[in-house]
Amino acid sequence: MSLLKGKTAIITGASRGIGKAIAVKYAQEGCDVAFTDLFEDDNMKATEQELIAYGVKAKGYASDASNFEDTDRVVSEIVKEFGRIDVLVNNAGITKDTLLMRMTEDQWDAVINVNLKSVFNFTKAAQRTMLKQRSGSIVNLSSVVGVSGNAGQANYAASKAGIIGFTKSVARELGSRGVRSNAIAPGFIITEMTGKIPEDARKAWEASIPLKRGGTPEEVAGVATFLASDLSSYVSGQVITVCGAMNT
Ligand code: NAD
């Protein structure tokens, strides 16, 4: 299939997990992919090779998405190398879960900076190119807990709720210039991030999901592909939940 042929995407935090699954699906659909992650390590090199094998242009860039100057630098490098930005996927994210009574200022700041400030950093740097092109699709990874809240995740839930407000504001601000902005709110997706959750807590989560299982990164990537493609040309300012009916 070639739903994304002729398009170029930037995906943050894509050396593994959901970001990598999105990068692979985009490459399968004919999209050139520039992706970032914190380090130029074996994961990054392996992802780069996997994408190139689909016959597209692909390159991994080491950058800290929470850092404003670093983001501006890497987006300029990508535009120089790839020529355009049709799709921006703000995927990089971390958790530092703990109850509010134990949460330190550092745990709060780290999660807000990596999860929320990064979305501002990359959108701000990429909008110049999208506005010039008069087209673009921004896809932000929020979470069901950004809508519902979650005990032990006040920092994470706040960052993911902030992403929803940002996504809707950008959709209103840039819509007249042909730029769309949407969020995906995944539920319980099986990745290294959720691998940290203890076995009994994981089983309890799964039992509470009507589809009776966690989702896969590929199932999130399917929705991210729809939002990047022209199939969603009239969809903007929305939050699409991918949660096996956990949050209805
Ligand atoms: P993951 O931990 O497997 O992957 C996250 C990637 O982001 C890693 O490669 C990591 O190195 C990278 N990263 C972290 N900090 C970074 C930074 N400052 N700059 C650049 N890259 C950075 O996580 P995942 O499960 O694949 O999650 C991806 C996104 O989806 C996150 O935003 C997460 O909050 C969101 N999400 C995940 C789930 C889930 O159940 N797994 C549910 C809802 C939302």
Image (cartoon, rainbow, N blue to C red):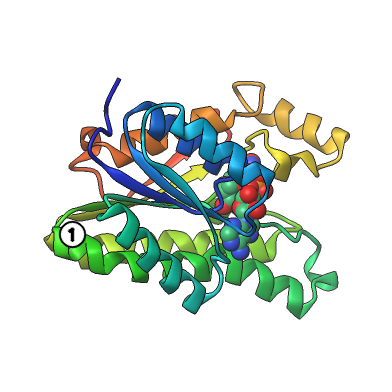
User: Can residue 17 be seen here?
Assistant: no
How far across and down, in percent of the image, does residue 207 sit? 73, 26
Instruction: Tell me: residue 12, above or below residue 235.
Output: below
How far across and down, in percent of the image, does residue 27 sit? 40, 32
Q: Nearer the viewer, residue 116 or 37?
A: 37
How many labels were placed on the picture?
A: 1
- How packed mark 1 is, by other alpha carbons closer than 10 Å (few <14, some 14-19, many 20 or more), is some
Q: Nearer the viewer, residue 16 or 58?
A: 58
- At label 1, the amino acid type is Gly
User: Can residue 99 be seen here?
Assistant: yes
Horizontal placement of 60 versus 181: left or right? right
**Residue 135 sits in which quadrant?**
bottom left
SS at badge 1: helix
Q: Which residue is mark 1?
A: 175
Q: Residue at x 44, y 66 (%)?
A: 74
Label 1 beta carbon within 8 A of ligand 1: no
How far across and down, in percent of the image, does residue 226 sit? 32, 34
**Residue 201 sits in which quadrant?**
top right
**Residue 73 sits in which quadrant?**
bottom left
